[in-house]
Amino acid sequence: MRRGGHHRLHVKQGGVKGLVGKLSIAVVVVLICTLSVLFSATITGTRGSASPSEINVEELWESANSGGWRPSSAPRSDWPPSPKETNGYLRVRCNGGLNQQRSAICNAVLAARIMNATLVLPELDANSFWHDDSGFQGIYDVEHFIHTLRFDVRIVESIPEIHKNGKKKKIKAYQLRPPRDAPISWYTTEALKKMKEHGAIYLTPFSHRLAEEIDNPEYQRLRCRVNYHALRFKPHIMKLSESIVDKLRAQGHFISIHLRFEMDMLAFAGCFDIFSPKEQEVLKKYRKENFAEKRLVYKERRAIGKCPLTPEEVGLILRAMGFDNSTRIYLAAGELFGGERFMKPFRSLFPHLENHSSVDSSEELAANTQGLIGSAVDYMVCLLSDIFMPTYDGPSNFANNLLGHRLYYGFRTTLRPDRKGLAPIFIDRENGRTSGFEEAVRRVMLKTNFGGPHKRVPPESFYTNSWPECFCQMSAQNPADQCPPNNVLDILSSQLESELTSDLQSNLTTSVA
């Protein structure tokens, strides 16, 4: 774990030659003991641990050690406001689920900044995934979104009509399909060229259409400003989420779990053998209709951690870590595949299981359990929970975005099971070899990160871990990590006001002339 202290060895040399030999032996003994303590701390990272595989559950309810870092996405270098005259309008259609769309919105804002374009409020292609037509205006606080990004890009709700030869005319956006993970150069050349030619471009689809790893910290910080500040759910969604969190927390701490044991993910992973022949047919049919053909062998997939954890496996991990049956758990999940027979073992270990419907039976949630509103409520409850545990954070945008948001929200504790490391332990248990099971699980979990700052290593996404670009230190050794001045917003406001004043004076001069 990550909460271990730092141990230092201070050795003073004496001036009496007769004591040199004894002191040398003493120093060696102290050094060996100290190294032993340090090695133990490296493995466990837990204050007061009695053994290398012990986990202090009480510490897990607290946020992780920040190491002196704090979230900061404000600009740290010259960041002029976007010019009044832009190169044209940018429309995008964000496809996928709520969190895939969220990442796309961040990319759309950055693309608009890169091209000096006016961003048209992003379109959410909800119909293809959720069969929900709430749209951006139905999920997010539009006024807050536009106001928060006023220093970064110009945003309009729709492309305005232009007047030409005394007539009103609509600008027709030129449709383009961006390459997946397109580099900045694509936007500053091909996309910008079409924008200048037509006055507006329409990028569709717009999921993963801008490279994540960009060698420009200010661009990355803009993504964080969008993701963690500008994108705020509408007030009624925030109120509903906070009400659920208050009810859960009224009885103490609670864990939120993204239980990704659903048909689409199981079909994607190719994990069929634990299901009945009829259920396997359903999964195989879904896979054939939605994913590329690929030879998948369950035992091979399971052995390398490619299968989502079953509900029972999740319960066994928590129990091995030291959580007892009084622990309250909030489940964020769609319809679990396989039904009650997979939930029963989990419920026997942890009977206090809740979801948004059981905590709040309001009509709005009942009508939108599987839609964008239900997903938004789950997102907020998981963000605000004391501990968050994803059970399959591979291609899951929900889990990955939450991991990044909780990191930015103050290094809030996350439990990220290493499925590859746990797989042989669970396989041994299924084959009757149960001796030392819980200790083996703890050893694997202790090697994972519990929510503290850590280096981003591929394939980890920027949206999962925006450290260090979107974090800073008050007393940084590296100037690039130094926190910006406290009045950074005043500076940006002054720049924006100065530009608006300049534009106004220019317009007045033109009118007088």
Image: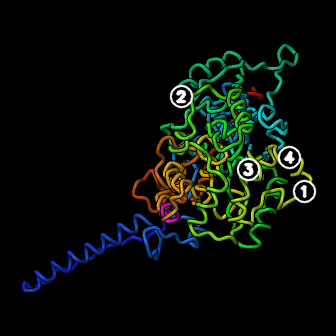
Say which label, 3 or 2, has the lower sequence index: 2
Q: Which residue is mark 2?
A: 183
Residue span colored magenta: 437-442
Q: Mark 1 near mark 2, Cβ–Cβ under 8 Å?
A: no
**Residue 333 badge:** 3
Q: Amino acid at mark 3?
A: Ala
Disc 4 from disc 3: Cα separation: 13 Å
Q: Secondary structure at mark 2?
A: loop
Q: Residue at x 44, y 76 (%)?
A: 50
Q: Secondary structure at mark 4?
A: loop
Say which label, 4 or 3, has the lower sequence index: 3
Say which label, 4 or 1, has the lower sequence index: 1
Q: Which residue is mark 1?
A: 362
Q: Secondary structure at mark 3?
A: loop
Q: Mark 4 near mark 1, Cβ–Cβ under 8 Å?
A: no
**Residue 308 badge:** none
Work out whether residue 374 or residue 171 is closer to the camera in this orientation and state it: 374
Q: Residue at x 74, y 47 (%)?
A: 336
- The overriding secondary structure of the stretch rendered in magenta is helix
